[in-house]
Image (tube, grey):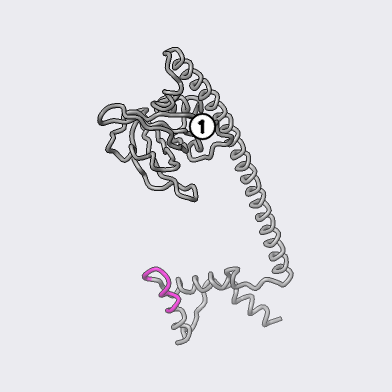
Amino acid sequence: MANEEALDGQWSQKQISVWMTRRRMEKLRALAASLPRAATPIDALDKALELATTPLFVPASEIDAARETREAGAETIAAIGRLEARLLAALAASDKNAAQSVRQIHHRVERVHEIAEDMRAMMASAANDDGLDEGADAQGRGAGAIPIGDWLRATAKALGEPAPRSLLARAAWRSKTRATETFVSMDFLCQLVAVDNTRAQNAPPPILIRIDLIEAQSPLSRLDSFNAICFSCALSPSGSWLVEAHSLEKQGKLGAVVGSFAT
């Protein structure tokens, strides 16, 4: 009983004296070195008490540890479930957008086909009105050939909004005639294959287009030496079309640029 009263008396004191042994001094100095400058022994003692009472140094019971492990595992599983749900939702939205884009391009290509048929009929009607002989015309400038600039603008208009920024067309040479001593005209059977780097589904049938006033000595005048070429067409800020003629490799990939022009 007397020992308990003496112990209570010690804890009720407002001030105690501690003998600074060499070991205590070394440990408090080492701790004070990690504190801001001018740390006193009291500061080091307070820091030691803080570290000693931090939960990291207080052992938890086995029951508490098991409960915390279960709770952490449940939270992890729930977080994984939420992440999986977001990924599935994003994938579904992506598939929906892709399908919608394909439907839009399909509709726009069908519209291009209608415009091309109208232009073909219009050109044929104009040729008949002028009394041209179809057989002779086919051997010369080509029956019903549409200037490539008109075809590009009509195709872009038919595709609607937003206006396409690029078109890719596969072409095969059909005829070449001399327009003047220094210029030639060339006709190609041309078919749309891609719009804004997306392959055109159910593309319209090929249409005969013409490139006029090609310099006879330019690389473009030698396009008739290729079995097939591709016209890569890009819309410029001014509204004109920049056309690059590419050779086609055996695998169907674009080859070197043979020539280019604006229309």
- Where in the figure is residue 206, as x and y percent of width and height? 51, 32
Q: Nearer the viewer, residue 44 or 8?
A: 44
Secondary structure found at label 1: loop
Q: Nearer the viewer, residue 208 or 202?
A: 208
Q: Is residue 219 above or below residue 60?
A: above
- Where in the figure is residue 79, as x and y percent of width and height? 65, 55
Q: Residue at x 46, y 83 (%)?
A: 20
Q: Nearer the viewer, residue 2 or 174?
A: 174
Q: Can see residue 244?
A: yes
Q: Which quadrant of the figure has residue 216?
A: top left
Q: Residue at x 49, y 50 (%)?
A: 251
236 sits to left or right of 48: left
**Can you name the residue that lies furthest to the bottom here?**
22
35 sits to left or right of 184: right
158 sits to left or right of 99: left
Q: Is residue 163 magenta?
A: no
**Can you name the residue that lies furthest to the left here?**
181
**Can you name the residue that lies furthest to the top here?**
129
Which residue carries the number 1 mark?
A: 206
Question: Residue type at mark 1?
Answer: Pro
Segment tinted magenta in the rendering: 29-38
Q: Which quadrant of the figure has residue 145?
A: top left
Q: Is residue 31 above or below residue 132?
A: below
Q: Quadrant of the C terminus?
A: top left
